[in-house]
């Protein structure tokens, strides 16, 4: 099946051939009885690849089976105080904070967007800051509108407070300095095309200093292979944010997905994805669609249609994979490999 009409990387990125081969190789070795320690070397490899991608030292990075696990870890580790989160976040970046608030660990401030196209805009966050705010958690790219947050400006606005970033809609397709953030969390199942069950979380030195994970399990402590029944101290590095071992096949898949992007060049991929999205955004607007995506975008383009469900169904009938959001908008998310002429065709079908 061709991916030419696949405009849904913001939902799921079909895994690449290299990802499939890497995961299969680990499964084959596991089936042949290779010792677990050798297979888990894939975790170190994935950590090195992810650390290189976001520019964090490897000691600050840990593999994670999805975005939610990393965000739960952060939410149950931040110091007591207020945490600001845009209300328009994907639920994966809302429930961890709600649950941490329910547990009495933090208080949660949901930030409304002055401009609904720009959830997590720096001005909104800056206006909501209070002296007791200890952290801010935003998406690097909004799943809802495609708005791309300005991490450097957010850092400037919040000062020394912790900046937690749900990066899944940007990872591998936005070329920026991730070290403006203290916690960068991403699943690998979208733009990295590494498949479900993959991901990572990266922690700055400040985050490693200040975050004390409640969800730290037996692999999160020193001498985790000593089963003495005694309580061991938490590890100093990011592996303190683990509860148990992950899947080496998932680690191998993540490393392979990242390598695909890094070898192609993150800058080149980002420019290509942004160019395709810009083309789509312009073409939809030219045909009279109400485009919700603002100028600051990466790969996601969202347009509101009267009868959006019918538009979505018409696109599906023509072989285009897109996402219907809240029954009134259609989300298009092409990758660098999406041919330009199929974008024009999708617009013609959507606006027919
Ligand atoms: C912004 C954002 N965060 C998180 C997720 C998914 O979280 P998880 O990786 O935990 O499934 C999605 C999409 O599914 C998303 O759009």
Image (tube, rainbow, N blue to C red):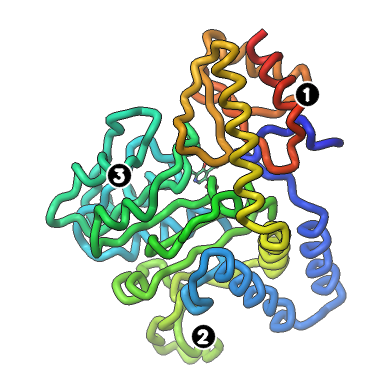
Badge 3: how crowded within 10 Å, few (<14), some, or many (20+)?
many
User: Callout 2: few (<14), some (14-19), or many (20+) C-alpha neighbours within 10 Å?
Assistant: some
Mark 1 vs 3: CB contact within 8 A: no
Provide residue 24's location: percent of width, then percent of height: 82, 63
Q: Which residue is mark 2?
A: 224
Task: Check contact, mark 3 vs mark 2: CB within 8 A.
Answer: no
> Which mark, by number, is residue 198?
none
Relative image position of residue 88 (x, y in whole percent): 38, 35
Of the two numbered discs 3 and 2 in the rendering, the one whose residue sits closer to the viewer = 3
Task: Say if residue 250 shows up in the picture.
Answer: no
Q: Residue at x 77, y 18 (%)?
A: 318
Nearest to the observer: residue 299 or residue 7? 299
The residue to which callout 1 is attached is 319
Question: Which mark, by number, is residue 122?
Answer: 3
Vertical comparison of 294 with 9: above or below = above
- Residue 237 location, x and y as percent? 45, 80
Kindly state the secondary structure of the residue where label 2 is placed: loop
Tell whether 122 sits left or right of 53.
Answer: left
In the displayed orientation, state which residue is furthest to the left. 131
- Figure quadrant of the C terminus: top right
Say whether disc 1 or disc 3 marks the residue closer to the N-terminus.
3
Q: Residue at the spot x=43%, y=65% of the render?
A: 179
Residue 336 vertical placement versus 73 (above, below)? above
The nearer-to-camera label among 2 and 1 is 1
């Amino acid at each position: 099946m061709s991916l030419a009409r696949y405009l849904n990387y913001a939902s799921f990125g079909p895994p690449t051939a290299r990802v499939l081969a890497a995961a299969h190789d680990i499964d084959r070795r596991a089936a042949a009885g290779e010792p677990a320690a050798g297979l888990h070397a894939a975790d170190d490899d994935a950590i090195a690849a992810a650390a290189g991608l976001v520019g964090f030292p490897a000691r600050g990075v840990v593999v994670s089976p999805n975005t939610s696990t990393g965000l739960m870890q952060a939410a149950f580790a931040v110091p007591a105080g207020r945490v600001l989160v845009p209300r328009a976040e994907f639920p994966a970046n809302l429930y961890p904070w709600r649950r941490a608030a329910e547990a009495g660990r933090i208080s949660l401030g949901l930030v409304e967007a002055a401009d609904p196209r720009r959830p997590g805009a720096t001005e909104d966050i800056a206006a909501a800051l209070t002296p007791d705010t200890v952290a801010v958690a935003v998406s690097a790219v909004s799943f809802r509108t495609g708005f791309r947050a300005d991490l450097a400006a957010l850092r400037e606005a919040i000062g020394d407070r912790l900046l937690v970033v749900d990066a899944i809609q940007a990872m591998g397709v936005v070329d920026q300095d991730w070290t403006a953030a203290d916690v960068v969390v991403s699943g690998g199942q979208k733009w990295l095309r590494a498949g479900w069950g993959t991901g990572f979380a990266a922690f700055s030195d400040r985050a490693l200093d200040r975050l004390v994970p409640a969800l730290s399990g037996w692999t999160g402590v020193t001498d985790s292979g000593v089963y003495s029944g005694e309580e061991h101290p938490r590890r100093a590095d990011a592996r303190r944010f683990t509860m148990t071992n992950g899947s080496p096949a998932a680690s191998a898949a993540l490393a392979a997905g990242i390598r695909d992007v890094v070898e192609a060049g993150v800058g080149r991929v980002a420019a290509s994805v942004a160019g395709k999205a810009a083309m789509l955004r312009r073409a939809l607007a030219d045909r009279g669609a109400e485009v919700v995506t603002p100028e600051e975008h990466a790969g996601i383009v969202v347009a509101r249609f009267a009868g959006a469900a019918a538009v979505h169904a018409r696109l599906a009938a023509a072989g285009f994979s897109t996402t219907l959001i809240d029954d009134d908008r259609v989300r298009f998310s092409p990758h660098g490999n999406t041919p330009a002429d199929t974008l024009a065709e999708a617009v013609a079908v959507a606006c027919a």
